[in-house]
Image (spheres, rainbow, N blue to C red):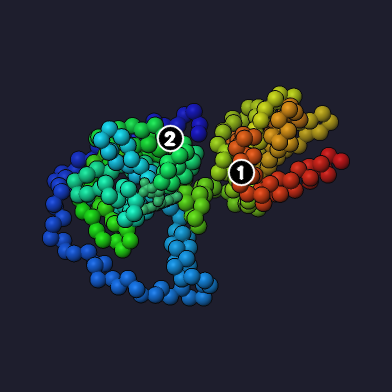
């Protein structure tokens, strides 16, 4: 993120005639009350278990990722959820869908408050933690707004009071009247096809790097911006990072050789794996340039997780040695 990122904006929502619990009385029963639960889904020519085909079909709908929270005594309880949607601006309403087996589902009722923290891309580990019952991973800091815990540094926050809950098959739907909302700047964490994704504007990247490696770099790295003429690295200096150019271009200078690299280029891919060696080149931003910077430990974790990414990186290293030769 750039240093001149505008400050986050926040506002309390107090519309005229604000939504009071009970104001939806008389709107009628849920339209879903008489849905038969044994009906088979037609999944066309998709093979295998129709339930899995159905789940995968739903997974094609790309979403953001939230951590939903509520206060339990003096503690915060949270869970990862992507079944969140906006419903109405006036009155301000949002909807969440919770599996009946989740603990949060048992905690919410009409009148209680829940918080929605829209996660930033770098918070994907938090999403993992809050999607496991054991909660044995990264612990967030919470801020408390209207007696409701919210994940610190999330991209957006909402606090809502449950005004209605509905039957939703094996899920329960909670309609919340929004009392507080704020948002900041940053990149959202995306979820699509059962995995985290990252927003990218440039298809050139996909053409230049094998997708398995690109996935790991984008997931684990963080964005750094360099101004024109700024040095990304200096020959000989010790470092344990690799960079992927996602915007702009850089000048790479080695003794007897210099070249310009653009979007999709990897820099420092040899040093990142050989932690004892210094930088082999001095690299300077030719224009305003954005890179995804991955640390050695993060990269190794990614390569361990997906051996195809490791093979892709080996392929790139091999081609470098061929070029040098
Ligand atoms: C990206 C992602 C999105 C999820 N979305 C939902 C959701 O919308 N509703 C839901 O009930 N569970 C959802 N889950 C699963 C819950 O996070 C998971 O079951 C969690 O352990 C529930 O909390 P609990 O163990 O405290 O009951 C999601 C998981 C992930 C990884």
Residue 287 occupies quadrant: top right
Q: Is residue 45 visible?
A: yes
Give the total of numbered labels: 2
Q: Which residue is mark 1?
A: 302
Q: N-terminal of the two: label 2 or label 1?
A: 2
Q: Count neighbours of disc 1 (C-alpha within 10 A) and say few if under 14, some if 14 to 19, many if 20 or more.
A: many
Disc 2 marks which residue? Answer: 139
Residue 271 x/y as whole percent: 72, 33
For label 2, the SS is loop
Task: Give the residue at the far top of this rendering.
Answer: 237
Residue at the far right: name it: 325
- Picture layout, residue 165 above or below residue 184: below
In depth, the one of 73 and 3 nearer the eye is: 73
Q: Is residue 117 left or right of residue 148?
A: right
Q: Residue at x 24, y 43 (%)?
A: 113
Left or right: where does residue 201 sit relative to residue 159? right
Where is residue 156 shown, x and y percent of the image?
37, 40
Q: Are marks 2 and 1 in contact (CB under 8 Å)?
A: no
The answer to which quarter of the image holds residue 324 is top right
Q: Which disc number belongs to residue 86? A: none
What is the x, y in percent for residue 228? Answer: 62, 30
Element carrying mark 1: helix
Residue 94 in view in this figure: no
């Amino acid at each position: 993120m750039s240093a001149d990122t505008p400050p986050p904006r926040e506002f309390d929502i107090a519309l005229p005639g604000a939504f009071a619990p009970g104001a939806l009385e008389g709107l009628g029963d849920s339209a879903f009350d008489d849905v038969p639960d044994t009906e088979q889904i037609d999944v066309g020519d998709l093979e295998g278990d129709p339930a899995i085909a159905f789940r995968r079909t739903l997974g094609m709908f790309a979403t953001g990722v939230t951590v939903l929270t509520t206060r339990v005594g003096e503690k915060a309880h949270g869970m990862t959820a992507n079944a969140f949607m906006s419903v109405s601006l006036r009155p301000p309403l949002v909807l969440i869908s919770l599996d009946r087996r989740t603990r949060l589902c048992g905690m919410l009722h009409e009148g209680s408050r829940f918080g929605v923290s829209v996660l930033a891309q770098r918070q994907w580990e938090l999403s993992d933690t809050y999607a496991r019952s054991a909660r044995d991973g990264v612990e967030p800091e919470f801020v408390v707004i209207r007696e409701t815990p919210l994940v610190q540094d999330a991209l957006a926050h909402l606090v809502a009071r449950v005004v209605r809950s509905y039957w939703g098959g094996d899920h329960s739907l909670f309609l919340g009247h929004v009392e507080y909302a704020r948002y900041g700047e940053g990149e959202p964490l995306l979820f699509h096809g059962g995995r985290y994704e990252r927003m990218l504007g440039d298809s050139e990247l996909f053409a230049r790097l094998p997708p398995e490696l690109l996935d790991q770099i984008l997931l684990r790295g963080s964005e750094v911006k360099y101004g024109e003429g700024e040095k990304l690295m200096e020959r000989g200096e010790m470092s344990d990072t690799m960079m992927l150019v996602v915007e702009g271009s850089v000048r790479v200078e080695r003794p007897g050789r210099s070249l310009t690299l653009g979007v999709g280029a990897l820099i420092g891919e040899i040093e990142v794996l050989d932690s004892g060696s210094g930088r082999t080149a001095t690299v300077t931003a030719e224009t305003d340039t954005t890179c995804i910077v991955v640390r050695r430990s993060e990269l190794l974790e990614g390569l361990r997780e997906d051996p195809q990414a490791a093979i892709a990186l080996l392929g790139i290293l091999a081609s470098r040695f061929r070029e040098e030769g």
